[in-house]
Image (cartoon, rainbow, N blue to C red):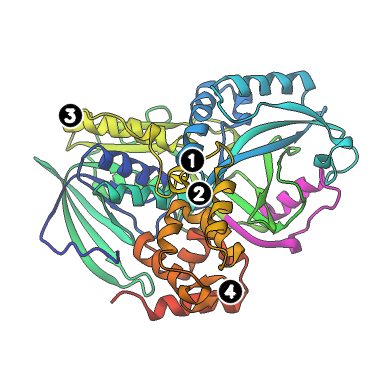
Amino acid sequence: MFEQNLAAPDVTADVLVVGGGINGVGIARDLAGRGWRVVLCEQDDLASHTSSASTKLIHGGLRYLEYREFGLVRKALQEREVLLRSAPHIMWPLRFVLPHDASMRPAWMIRLGLWLYDHLAQREFLPGSHGVALQHSALGRPLQPGWRCGFVYSDGWVDDARLVVLCAQDAQRHGATILTRTRCERLQAHADGWRAELQSRDAHTGQATAQTRVRARCVVNAAGPWAEHLLRQVMAVPPQGSVQPASSGRLRLVKGSHIVVRKLFEHDHAYIFQGQDRRIIFAIPYEDDFTLVGTTDVEHHDDPGRVAISEDEVQYLCHELGRYLAQPITPADVVWAYAGVRPLLDDASGNAAAVTRDYQLQTHTAPAPWLTVWGGKLTTFRVLSEQAAGQVGALLGEQRPDWTASATLPGGDLGQAMGQPAQPGRAHRQWAQWLQARHPGLNPALLNRWARSYGSAALDLLDGVRHTADLGAEVAPGLHERELRHLMTHEWARTADDVLWRRSKLGLHLDSAGREAVARWLTSVRPQ
């Protein structure tokens, strides 16, 4: 599936969705599954901004209880197991260790907060919280001896960029047209809806290629940090229309940055630390050999597309970890870093870390039907999309039933693929073992990565494959032509960054020569 050529004078759709982050693809998926004709355009690659720069957690947000955001926490907790069941190959449970700092708050307050966290929403397979004596546990070994007690609780982990791709795939399977590297240049209201001018660009050169005109009955603005720009500069909504979040008056852009270092501990739990400024720092097992550390909360006033971690942020994360770890890290230990801009509802919080992560959906019927998504967080994308699809249906004059709560994402039907029940919370390990037993002639490390990345779709990649030679040339260690062609054909990948940092994290495992080899191969076979 190379760039789709929509060269006809007009492409007619019910809904045009602008934005290929998690909210945009989630809404496109939900609408297409309800039978609406959907076109989605994204100016860059899928998940190339905010949605690939998260802390990669499916969580209720324990710290939001302190800000009394009980509704947001409950909504997120209700979604945890729904999401974990929908794509168990890229999402699974994760246990968190919270060392107790008596100078911050008493132990009884932590216990009360964790009791609420355990009971605000039903849990079917995630274990509840409990205390732990760190000085007598393997969980305490990486920590300084002064940390003597703590707590353990459950949340989940997700490969955020792959989640976006899976939603886009599911949207396409239900009939949606997905246009990546296609910017919405103009939106003009007409009596029967909107006329949109879309401009596609070459992934390697940036040169303009196809121009597409779309006629849509309704527009969904899921542009994230660019939501206000789309309304004011592209849509040119009349000034009398309210084009800002009703609760605040403006969108607040907050940069969150993360660092990746070599593995800091051997067990499979993550840590949640509280900084001296009361911000939360996570240290999470990552890509087998690494630890992911983050995040920061820094006001961002520049172009959302131009964002990078600062030296001060790196120093801050290293310093805060130094309060807890027996072997502190320094900026020299950082092997990779990333940053993203979160578009948050401005709730007048002075502290950027305290700004709400809830969302608001805003609909209008004039000058033509449109909906804007303000704010949001990764964990609540599905329920946000469900609510947005319902509101779009109301704008279009027809309500169609919900469907995503019990649906799996592409590759998520592991039990059906194995012909045996998938164990909740352990299905990803069960699937990897099944796949390795089925293909004993292939590298177990490769099969384990494919099991986690593609789920049951790995069977398509392995169709007709008996030996490593059947995978084609090894372009870089562990990355063969067969997989690269799959990523181009089925996952919209075009550049080395698409492959190495979003569809996978192989960029962490390859040296510069390997990364350059992937870039050369993709350039040599790019669609004409």
Residue that mark 2 sits on:
160
Q: Position of residue 158 (x, y in %)?
A: 54, 45
Under mark 2, the amino acid is Asp
Asked if residue 377 shows in the view, the reply is: no
Judge by depth and name the residue closer to the eye, 519 or 127. Answer: 127
**Which stretch is magenta?**
312-338
Cα distance between the residues tagged 3 and 4: 52 Å
In the visual, does 253 lie left or right of 181? Answer: right
- Element under label 1? helix
Under mark 3, the amino acid is Glu
Cα distance between the residues tagged 1 and 4: 32 Å
Asked if labels 1 and 2 touch by Cβ distance under 8 angstroms, the answer is: yes
In the visual, does 430 lie left or right of 96? Answer: left
Tag in front: 3 or 4 = 4
Cα distance between the residues tagged 2 and 1: 8 Å
Under mark 4, the amino acid is Pro
Asked if residue 51 shows in the view, the reply is: yes
Res 157 → quadrant: top right
Residue occupying the point 48% across, 59% down: 503
What is the tally of numbered marks visible in this picture? Answer: 4
Residue that mark 4 sits on:
477
Residue that mark 1 sits on:
378
